Amino acid sequence: MIKKLRKSSSLFVFAIIVCIIWWAFVVFADNVSYAQNLKSPDPFTLVSDKNLLTDYKPVDDNGDINVVVEIPAGTTAKWEVVKPSGELNWNFSNGKPRRVKYLGYPGNYGMVPRTIMPKELGGDGDPIDVLVLGPPVARGSVVQAKLIGVLKMIDNGEQDDKLIAVLRDTPFYTLPSIKELDETFLGVTDIIQIWFANYKGPDKIETEGFGDEIEASRILQSAINAFNQSQENRLSIQ
C-alpha cells in the first residue's frame, strides 16, 4: 500500500514537472513579454484588469489612437482580443497554437478599442486592425499612435483594411502621412504591402494599395460609429 502511494505521488510530481516545462516552453517560445498589468492563468490566455475591447477610448485627447498590441513586431504567434471578455487569447488551428508561417510581423499589430468593422460594410465584424510602426512593445500593451494611412485589402472576399500608424516617442512619429513615410524611410511601404500580400500564402490576399490619412480617419470613424450603434442596439433590446 505504501509503495503504491509512493508510486502515485511520484507520477503526480512527474506530471506537474511536465506541465511546468510545457507551460514555460509555450510562454517563452517567442521570447515575448506581456504588459505588466496582465495576468496569465494559462499559457494561452492573458487577462487584463480592464476589458481591452471596451474600457479604453478609441482616440486619445490629443487625437492619437489607442491601440491594443496583440502581436509585437517581429513575432509570429497569433494572439487576439476576444469578444466579449476582452481577454487576449492565443488562436488555435487544428488543435495547436497558431503561428504565422512567414517572417514575423513588420510592426506591432493590434486593434483599436470600441470599434467594429461590420459585415454590412464589407468587414468581418471584429474591431479594426492596426499596424503600428516602431520598436517591439510588450503583448497586451495599450499604446498611443498617430494614424497616417491605410492598407486596403481583400481577404476571402471581405474588406480587411489595415490602418497604418506610427508609435508615439519614436522617429516615425514625426511623419504626418504615408507619402512622408515613403519619402523618409525608403522601402517601408513596400515591405508592409508585400508582407500582407503573402503571409497567408500565395494568392490568398489581394492588396489594393494605400489610402492617405484622411481616408484612414474616415474608415476609423465608421468603425467607431458602428461600435456605438451596436451598443445602442444592445441596450434597446435589454
Image (tube, rainbow, N blue to C red):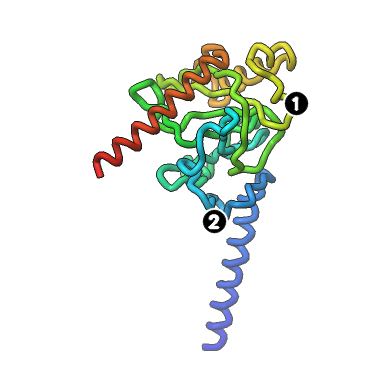
Give the number of the disc on residue 117: none
Alpha carbon distance from label 1 to label 2? 36 Å
Name the residue rendered at 64%, 59% in the picture.
21
- Rendered position, 179 above or below 10: above
Name the residue rendered at 25%, 45% in the picture.
238
Name the residue rendered at 62%, 61% in the picture.
20
The front one of 129 and 94 is 129
Q: Which of marks 1 and 2 is nearer the N terminus?
A: 2
- Rendered position, 119 above or below 113: above
The location of residue 92, given as percent across then percent down, is 49, 43
The location of residue 128, given as percent across then percent down, is 48, 29
Residue highlighted by disc 2? 42
Q: Which amino acid does label 2 sit on?
A: Asp
SS for callout 2: strand
Question: Is residue 47 in view?
Answer: no
Residue highlighted by disc 1? 171
The location of residue 99, given as percent across then percent down, is 57, 37
Closer mark to the observer between disc 1 and disc 2: 1
The location of residue 210, given as percent across then percent down, is 56, 13
